[in-house]
């Protein structure tokens, strides 16, 4: 049986992956104080956001699957 904590972590990671997918499909992301910026307007910010959210979601999923108690 999956614990509530592991389930919440897995759902949070799934939501992060959904946001990455949304940003990828629309070729942009939200920047604090500037609003929505496209990939052409802010390429470094776009790639930083994509990589950061992918790594965080992968680590969260891995930790919730590996560290079951």
Image (tube, grey):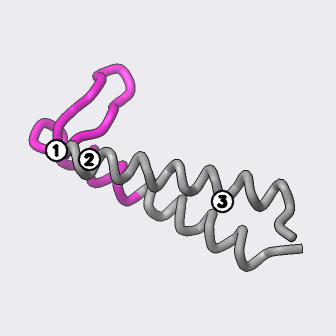
Looking at the rendering, in which quadrant would you find the N terminus? bottom right
Q: Is residue 49 magenta?
A: yes
Pointers 1 and 2 in contact (C-beta within 8 Å): yes
- Identify the magenta region: 27-51
What residue is drawn where x is 33% and y is 33%? 30
In the rendered structure, the answer to whether residue 62 lies left or right of residue 44 reads right
- The extreme left residue here reads 40
Q: Report the disc number at residue 39.
A: 1
Looking at the rendering, in which quadrant would you find the C terminus? bottom right
Q: Is residue 47 magenta?
A: yes
Pointers 2 and 3 in contact (C-beta within 8 Å): no
Instruction: Give the SS element for disc 2.
Output: helix
Label 2 to label 3: alpha-carbon separation: 24 Å
Q: Earlier in the sequence, mark 1 or mark 3?
A: 3
Q: Report the disc number at residue 10.
A: 3
Mark in the foreground, 2 or 3: 3
């Amino acid at each position: 049986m999956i614990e509530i904590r592991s389930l919440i972590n897995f759902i949070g990671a799934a939501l992060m992956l959904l946001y990455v997918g949304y940003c990828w499909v629309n070729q942009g992301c939200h920047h604090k104080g500037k609003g929505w910026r496209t990939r052409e307007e802010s390429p470094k910010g776009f790639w930083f956001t994509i990589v950061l959210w992918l790594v965080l979601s992968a680590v969260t999923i891995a930790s919730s699957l590996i560290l079951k108690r």
